[in-house]
């Protein structure tokens, strides 16, 4: 793609997210979401493959539906209460409608069915943008409106997302779909504490972005989109294959890796709020997600696939792509747990 066009598209992505971040008016926030959606569509369809065009069409329809629901809920709330401010979404019907629309926008279960299919149809680099940057603006609105939403709705969305996010990834062989279900599960953890401790939602979002960026950049570096090709990744990048295992276990939330930090803090907060049953359920659903991360780790390190590999043999060649971002995100995805006392200090 022309570099000038890419510059315009990336600038529009930044502009849309910044507009939503800085706005206190629903119309401005809605405009930011729309700019975001329109800017990423050419990036998704740039390969001109039928599957990419299909994924782009699905994404556009879903995002347009969610944006229309948000605009309708904001207009209804202004009609009832006379307020267009984001933090004044006080009517129970409009707040529930807004939260449902935002859940559809980010891909929370049970409104998640579009996310794995869309991620499967686009490239890994575009999938990275879709899984990280495109979540920021809707999550900012979720955090601002969570205080007026019904706690049962938030808990239902969170527990359903963590359960389906783990369950849906069990039988997958396509790595992009596995990362999509991983995204759904992590979003469930964020939503669960968005009402009682929004600062923990931000911590969970930051660690999710770091770990997901490391996962996508790793797969992009070794040019792998299927589980079967992971078994031969060590032939051209043995060190990266070893670090990939740590990064996958961090996504699963195993100590002493970075992914354990948000889960630990969220479960501790739930227990302190007297929600021991909710904390137990979400911890058990994390075990389901951990299973397919362990399965990927097993595929990377301990197996050579018995099936015939139809891909070309990935010989060890000199990498021609920059690896600074990959190095930074991999280190951050595995080594941030020791700063937990600092986070505790900043939160209190």
Image (spheres, grey):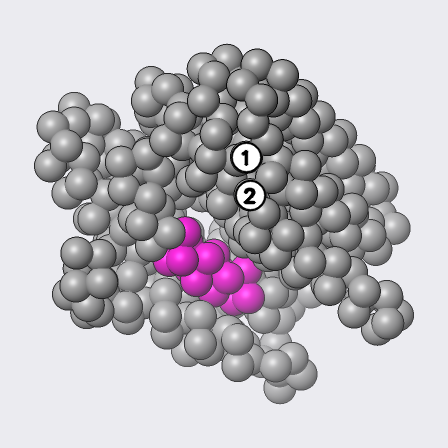
Q: Which mark is residue 24?
A: 2
- Residue reaching furthest front? 82
The magenta-colored residue range is 205-218
Kindly report the distance in space between the C-alpha atoms of the residues bearing marks 2 and 1: 5 Å
The residue closer to the viewer here, 345 or 51, is 345
CB-based contact (under 8 Å), mark 2 and mark 1? yes
Q: Residue at x 71, y 42 (%)?
A: 31
The residue closer to the viewer here, 39 or 257, is 39
- Examine the structure image and report whether residue 60 is included in the region drawn in magenta: no
In the shown orientation, is residue 90 left or right of residue 80? left
Q: Secondary structure at mark 1?
A: loop
Q: Could you tell me residue 21's position as x and y percent? A: 55, 51
Q: How many marks?
A: 2
Q: Could you tell me residue 88's position as x and y percent? A: 48, 29
- Examine the structure image and report whether residue 210 is included in the region drawn in magenta: yes
Query: Dot 1 corresponds to which residue?
Result: 85
Where 276 falls versus 182 (above or below)?
above
Q: Residue at x 54, y 18 (%)?
A: 81
Q: Quadrant of the C terminus?
A: bottom left
Q: Quadrant of the N terminus?
A: bottom right
- Residue 219, can we see it? yes
- Residue 303, can we see it? no
Q: Could you tell me residue 251's position as x and y percent? A: 36, 53
């Amino acid at each position: 793609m022309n570099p000038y066009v890419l510059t315009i598209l990336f600038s529009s992505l930044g502009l849309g997210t910044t507009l939503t971040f800085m706005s206190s008016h629903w119309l401005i926030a809605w405009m930011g979401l729309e700019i975001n959606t329109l800017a990423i569509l050419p990036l998704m369809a740039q390969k001109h493959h039928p599957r990419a065009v299909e994924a782009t069409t699905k994404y556009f329809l879903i995002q347009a539906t969610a944006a229309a629901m948000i605009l309708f809920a904001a207009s209804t709330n202004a009609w009832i209460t006379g307020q267009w401010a984001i933090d004044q979404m006080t009517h129970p019907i409009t707040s529930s409608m807004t939260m449902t629309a935002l859940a559809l926008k980010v891909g929370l279960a049970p409104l998640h069915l579009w996310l794995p299919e869309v991620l499967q149809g686009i490239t890994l680099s575009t999938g990275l943008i879709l899984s990280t940057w495109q979540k920021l603006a809707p999550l900012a609105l979720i955090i601002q409106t969570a205080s007026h939403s019904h706690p049962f709705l938030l808990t239902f969305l969170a527990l359903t997302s963590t359960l389906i996010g783990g369950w849906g990834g069990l039988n997958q062989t396509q790595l992009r779909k596995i990362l999509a279900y991983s995204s759904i599960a992590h979003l469930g953890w964020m939503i669960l504490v968005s009402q009682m401790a929004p600062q923990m939602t931000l911590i969970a979002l930051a660690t999710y972005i770091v770990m997901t960026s490391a996962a996508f950049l790793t797969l992009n570096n070794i040019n792998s989109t299927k589980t079967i090709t992971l078994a031969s990744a060590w032939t051209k990048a043995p060190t990266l294959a070893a670090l990939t295992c740590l990064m996958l276990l961090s996504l699963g939330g195993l100590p002493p890796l970075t992914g354990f930090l948000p889960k630990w803090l969220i479960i501790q907060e739930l227990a302190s709020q007297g929600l021991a049953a909710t904390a137990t359920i979400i911890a058990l659903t994390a075990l389901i997600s951990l299973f397919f991360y362990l399965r990927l780790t097993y595929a990377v390190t301990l197996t050579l696939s018995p099936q015939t590999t139809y891909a070309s043999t990935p010989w060890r060649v000199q990498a021609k792509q920059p690896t600074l971002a990959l190095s930074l995100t991999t280190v951050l995805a595995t080594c941030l747990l020791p700063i937990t006392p600092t986070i505790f200090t900043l939160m209190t």
